[in-house]
Image: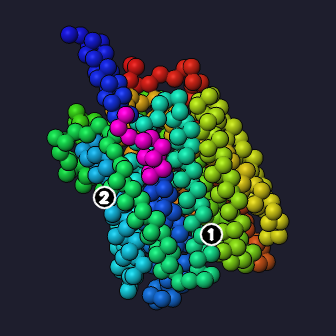
Amino acid sequence: MDDSNKAGMNLKENMVMSEKSSLNFNRTLLACIFLIGTFVTILNQTVLFTALPEIMIDFGISAGTGQWLTTAYLMANGILLPVTAFFISKYTTRQLMIVAMSLFIIGTTLAAVSPNFTLLLIARIIQACGASITMLLMQTVFFIIFPREKRGTAMGLVGLVIAFAPAIGPTLSGLIMNHFSWRYIFFMVLPVAVIVLILTLVYMKNVTEVNKRQKIDIPSVFLSTVGFGALLYGISIAGSGSALSAAVCCIVGATGLTLLILKGLRSEKPMLEFRVFKSYAFVLSTIAVVISFICLMGPQTMLPIYIQNIRGMTALESGLILLPGAVVNGIVSMIAGKIYDRIGGKYLGVIGYILIAVSVIPFIFMHAQTALWMIVLFYALMIVGISMIMMPMTTEGLNALPDHLINHGTAMINTFRQVGGSIGTALLITIYTEVSSHAVESGRFNEVAQSQVHGVNYAFIGVFVFVIIGLVGSSLLKSRKGQVALSSK
């Protein structure tokens, strides 16, 4: 039997299996369980931003130590994302969702009652393990349960969760902190997580293909953990003055990832399939997604510095100023998904980056007395552009892959988004710090606040450079008619 006949039989078998499985689950119910579960887990990425000062007082820790509650969460997320691709191939949808929500509930409960900082930090890491599984599993499942012509709309809902949840985190925690202690931030999300776990136990069905004979590749897990872990840690300490330590960690991380890639390319069934990067469309889409995430995280880091440190406003006021952007994100994500189903990702990406470029320019010329309405307006416009890129481009990249590589492609895009976003944000903070310090030392400005504004301006110049790279990359994508998936090659 020749290869074409085998491929035809495999395709028919896959179609029959999809038809049978579609009769066994309620797609809307499954989507709702994943959306709510992922929303509540991802919300915890940023929910402690506003609560950090009170946590510092309660446990007697410094700001640098307290920041690890967020840094460790993101690091654990980034480390586990690549391994989750293997879990999705090895275990059923139901098993993974039960484990993910159970981990999140355990972590949230421990965080709420933590008597010391160490236990709170451990609880945050446990939360992150659950969050990384739900995020990756949701995207993989959505690509399976929704037909190709509706994937854009489905991923628009995913984009709503992934971007909207962390965006409202600081505002939501600020509102809670106005009336209760920081522990209630965890107590209030706990019932939602428990409800999602109950719904999972009762209604969740298995929709992913499972290979129970597949064995975990311990050396690959080790290389992945060391590679991504050391790289993310090196990036996180780069701006704290530990230049040598940061460089060593980044070198160790890069070495680990290089060995992981070489091992994966020599293996027939690698833990993480780097061959997805043979797809030109997937590579360009991943670059576009990573840069759009930098454009999201950079301003979300720099604008609170400007609003709170320079304008002297509170963390809650800062969150409220950025809140309209989060609302816009939710609306545009769903609309952009539907538009993607009609025209594909190229034109959405180009228009999105043009909007970001236009919105970044006013921040480059921002001063200490810039009207707050301008910040609200142009930040919201920036979010419109980002929403037109992030999930549509994710869908564009994954659509270029055959079905059996979607879980690997999803892991790659999310991991590179996490690592790229960390690198980009660290670079922008470094630009801000160096420019501000140089301006103070040179005596160019009479006030420290003016020097800080100068640093923020240059950081947004860095954002603009990233935007240009993203615009060029998006324009190189082929239009929908020219797209060819790896599966057809």
- Left or right of residue 380, residue 412 in this image: left
Question: What is the span of residues highlighted in magenta in the rendered image?
Answer: 23-34
Residue to which mark 2 is pinned: 99
Q: Which amino acid lies under the numbered mark 1 shown in the image of this protein?
A: Thr
For residue 301, above or below residue 68? above
Instruction: Answer whether residue 29 is magenta in the image.
Output: yes
Of the pair 435 and 189, the residue shown nearer to us: 189
Of the pair 9 and 398, the residue shown nearer to us: 9
| Residue drawn at 58 percent across, 31 percent down | 341
| Residue drawn at 48 percent across, 61 percent down | 40
Asked which quadrant contains residue 427, the reply is bottom right
Q: Which amino acid lies under the numbered mark 2 shown in the image of this protein?
A: Val
Residue 144 rendering spot, x and y as whole percentages = 40, 36
Residue to which mark 1 is pinned: 171
Quadrant into which the N terminus falls = top left
- Helix, strand, or loop for circle 1? helix
Residue 260 rendering spot, x and y as whole percentages = 28, 46
Q: Is residue 285 visible?
A: no
| Residue drawn at 40 percent across, 19 percent down | 488
| Residue drawn at 37 percent across, 70 percent down | 107
Q: Is residue 225 visible?
A: yes
Instruction: Answer whether residue 430 is magenta in the image.
Output: no
For residue 21, above or below residue 479? below
- Helix, strand, or loop for circle 2? helix
